[in-house]
Image (cartoon, rainbow, N blue to C red):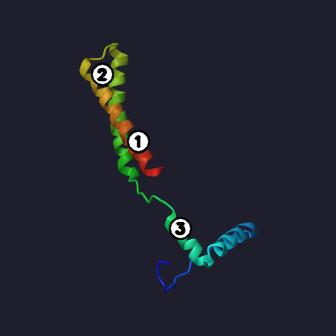
Amino acid sequence: MRTKEKNKMIAIRLNEKDYNYFKENAEKVNLSLTDYFVELLYKQNIKITHIDTKELETELKRQGNNINQIAKKLNETGQCTKEETEEIKTKYLYIQRLLNEIYDKIK
């Protein structure tokens, strides 16, 4: 057990079936329901993340605007310079990397 003194309480509501399931499992390993839940919770691999969505939203808008400006010029002129093509690729890869970082944090 983690600590002997337990002076804080968290209440949860269970239906009869779930309650019996947890009670029986706790009894099988000779633990009280409290100790059983504490052990279950400590064994969980729960990622706690905070994503600054405002900063991310600003950056995605900035990158999107840059790509839109290049696309507008391409539509108007029918041409795209090598530098503009590279810039589009770079911006696209940057956005893809940002989205992958977000996905890794929340999965």
As drawn, which residue projects farthest toward the top? 78
Q: CA distance from mark 1 to mark 3?
A: 28 Å
Give the amino acid at mark 1: Asn
Q: Residue at x 25, y 18 (%)?
A: 82
Q: Is residue 28 left or right of residue 93?
A: right
Label at residue 85: 2
Q: Are marks 2 and 3 in contact (CB under 8 Å)?
A: no
Q: Are marks 1 and 3 in contact (CB under 8 Å)?
A: no
Residue wearing tag 1: 100
Of labels 2 and 1, the one closer to you = 1
| Residue density around tag 2, few if under 14, some if 14–19, many if 20 or more, within 10 Å | few
Q: Nearer the viewer, residue 61 or 36?
A: 36
Q: Nearer the viewer, residue 26 or 84?
A: 26
Could you say where residue 74 lies in the image, as x and y percent from the top left? 34, 18
Could you say where residue 32 lies in the image, as x and y percent from the top left? 61, 79
Label at residue 41: 3
Q: Nearer the viewer, residue 55 or 6?
A: 6
Q: Residue at x 57, y 77 (%)?
A: 35
Label at residue 6: none
Q: Relative to residue 22, is residue 76 depicted above or below?
A: above
Of labels 2 and 3, the one closer to you = 3
Give the amino acid at mark 2: Thr
Q: CA distance from mark 2 to mark 3?
A: 50 Å
| Helix, strand or loop for disc 3 | helix
Could you say where residue 58 lies in the image, as x and y percent from the top left? 35, 45
